[in-house]
Amino acid sequence: MLKEQKDAHLSRAMTMYGDYLLRVCYTYVQDWTVAEDLVQDTFVNYYEKMEQFREEASVKTYLYRIAINKCHSYLSSWRYKKIKVIDYWSKLKSLSDNPEEEILMGETDALLVASIEQLPTKYKDVLLLFHFAEFSLKDVAELLKLPVNTVKTRLRRARQMVGFTLLEEGFEYGSDS
């Protein structure tokens, strides 16, 4: 493949899927800067291995798989774990400075994000791909190399786990109290 063709393929993929990949990466890492870096790494990886792409799946599915793998690698890295500890202590310090302000900053959204973050990876992947990346069940199954019924089961269980977490925290359906 000629360099011009590769550049055109990459440019088209970045235009079509860049925003979606950024949202998916952000849902995993909860940091826009890191998500942007992971998306950039995804496109670099795609560009370098473009000739190896056998087109057994769509480019979108291929890019999402690369991005998810990048997110998993980042989340299991020492650097991420160190940052999480530093952030945790910073939040504890800020809570003691102004607790009223912290309470007003969207408890419900924070609770939902926290409950999704607590899910085991196999459930989080299915939930994020289906609801946030807006893949169909069939596409999620193809992407994760799972039977469709397994994807349905994991999605149902993920929703249940998030629901149980929200109920335990006092969140009731239709309200935020």
Image (cartoon, helix red, strand yellow):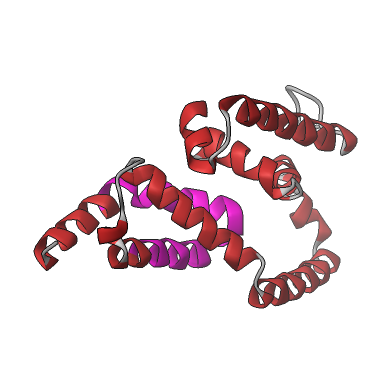
- Left or right: 66, with 16 as reference point: right
Where is residue 60, by image quadrant? Answer: top left
Q: Is residue 113 above or below residue 98?
A: above
Left or right placement of residue 81 versus residue 149 in this view: right
Quarter of the view holding residue 86: bottom right
Residue 2 image point, x, y percent:
11, 64
Q: Nearer the viewer, residue 50 or 68?
A: 50
Q: Residue at x 80, y 63 (%)?
A: 98
| In this rendering, position of residue 72 left or right of residue 23 | right
Number of numbered discs visible in the structure rendering: 0
Is residue 18 rendered magenta in the image?
A: yes
Vertical comparison of 18 with 49: above or below: above
Residue drawn at 83 percent across, 68 percent down? 92
Q: Position of residue 39 (x, y in %)?
A: 42, 61
**In front of the other: 13 or 45:** 45
Q: Which residues are magenta?
A: 15-43
**Residue 72 vertical position relative to residue 115 in the rendered view, above or below:** below
Q: Looking at the magenta stretch, what is its main secondary structure?
A: helix
Q: Residue at x 54, y 42 (%)?
A: 144
Q: Nearer the viewer, residue 16 or 73?
A: 73
Q: Nearer the viewer, residue 48 or 12?
A: 48
Q: Is residue 54 magenta?
A: no
Work out which quarter of the rendered image holds the C terminus and state it: top right
Whether residue 134 appears in this view of the structure is no
- Residue 41 coordinates in the image, percent (x, y): 41, 67
Could you say where residue 3 lies in the image, as x and y percent from the top left?
Answer: 13, 67
| Position of residue 174 in the picture relative to residue 39 (left or right) | right
Residue 57 visible in the shown view: yes
